[in-house]
Image: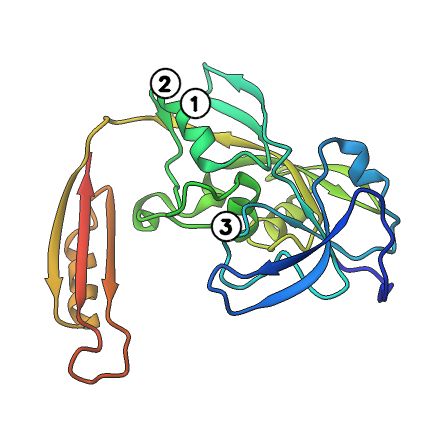
């Protein structure tokens, strides 16, 4: 979130200095860290403080911390706020993890169609990165299951974002890496879980070109993905494995 102050030294209550490390270990920075557990913690921060929201911290690109920036880790905002069984919609706080939500929803035979690969990613992080699963060919990315966002902005307070209300900010927030404000809660569309088992098939691939053909030939599958050798060796570059899954 952009502000005007350069913040040479942050003096903010309930904060500590933390060494943040990107998921791939390539970036390390010591900066101020706060874990708010109530809304007033968001409101009490001076407006000129540069801050950024943080979820589980599983991004390779380290968007949730920086030098002289206050990182507000939202993992204590982790409750289910509303559930409508008829419409199969749910409102959760942004710090709830994918694992926590799916553990709850599976009991009701419901699930999120879009699921990234790590169970401890938060719902706020899923929105901020507009994550994908193994089925974007069929179901899109995370924005396609997001109905509404509650966003805190230091100048405008708590804002409601949707496709019909503040739609421009809604679009910027989904995939905006936290730069529009602190995501407080999210309303999501759940779907009926087709089954509790999946059939997976694995196909060896000799090249990236083979992978393209593999995807074209399996667009009817519920999930398709591939992994490839990206080492500089000409002998092995592009070789990999394709996966398809159906319920």
User: If you read the primary sequence from the N terminus, does the residue marked by circle 2 or circle 3 appear first?
Assistant: 2
Tell me the residue that label 1 is attached to.
104
Kindly indicate the quadrant of the structure image that contains residue 186: top right
Residue 193 horizontal side relative to residue 37, left or right: left
Kindly indicate the quadrant of the structure image that contains residue 184: top right
Q: Are marks 1 and 2 in contact (CB under 8 Å)?
A: yes
Give the class, few, some or many, for how many residues have Cα within 10 Å of label 1's Cα (few <14, many ≥20): few
Residue 98 horizontal side relative to residue 38, left or right: left
Q: Which residue is drawn at 25% across and 62% down?
A: 227
Q: Which residue is drawn at 36% across and 23% down?
A: 106
**Element assignment for label 2:** loop
Residue 110 horizontal side relative to residue 27, left or right: left
User: If you read the primary sequence from the N terminus, does the residue marked by circle 3 or circle 1 appear first?
Assistant: 1
Report x, y in % for residue 170: 63, 45
Report x, y in % for residue 146: 52, 37
Is 237 drawn above or below residue 190 in the view shown? below
Residue 186 horizontal side relative to residue 113, left or right: right
Between 38 and 238, the one nearer to me in the picture:
38
Report x, y in % for residue 49: 84, 55
Between 209 and 49, the one nearer to me in the picture:
49
Tell me the residue that label 3 is attached to.
130
Q: Distance between the residues labelled 3 and 1?
A: 22 Å
Tell me the residue that label 2 is attached to.
107
Give the class, few, some or many, for how many residues have Cα within 10 Å of label 3's Cα (few <14, many ≥20): many
**Element assignment for label 3:** loop
**2 or 3: mark nearer the eye:** 2
Kindly indicate the quadrant of the structure image that contains residue 64: bottom right
Q: How far apart are marks 1 and 2 (CA)?
A: 6 Å
């Amino acid at each position: 979130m952009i502000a005007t102050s350069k913040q040479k030294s942050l003096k903010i209550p309930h904060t500590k200095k933390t060494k943040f490390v990107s998921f791939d270990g390539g970036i390390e920075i010591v900066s101020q860290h706060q874990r708010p557990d109530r809304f007033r913690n968001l409101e009490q921060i001076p407006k000129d403080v540069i801050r950024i929201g943080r979820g589980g911290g599983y991004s390779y690109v380290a968007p949730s911390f920086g030098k002289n920036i206050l990182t507000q880790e939202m993992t204590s905002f982790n409750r289910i706020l509303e559930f409508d069984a008829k419409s199969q919609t749910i409102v959760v706080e942004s710090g709830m993890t994918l694992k926590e939500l799916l553990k709850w929803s599976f009991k009701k035979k419901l699930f999120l169609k879009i699921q990234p690969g790590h169970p401890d990613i938060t719902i706020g992080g899923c929105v901020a990165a507009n994550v994908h699963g193994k089925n974007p060919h069929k179901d899109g990315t995370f924005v396609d299951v997001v109905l509404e966002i509650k966003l805190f902005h230091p100048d405008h307070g708590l804002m409601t974002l949707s496709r019909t209300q503040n739609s421009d900010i809604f679009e910027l927030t989904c995939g905006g890496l936290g730069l529009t404000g602190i995501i407080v809660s999210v309303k999501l569309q759940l779907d009926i879980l087709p089954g509790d088992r999946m059939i997976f098939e694995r196909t060896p691939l000799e090249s990236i070109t083979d992978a393209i053909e593999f995807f074209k030939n399996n667009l009817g599958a519920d999930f398709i993905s591939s992994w490839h050798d990206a080492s500089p060796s000409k002998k092995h570059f592009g070789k990999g494995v394709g996966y398809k899954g159906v319920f």
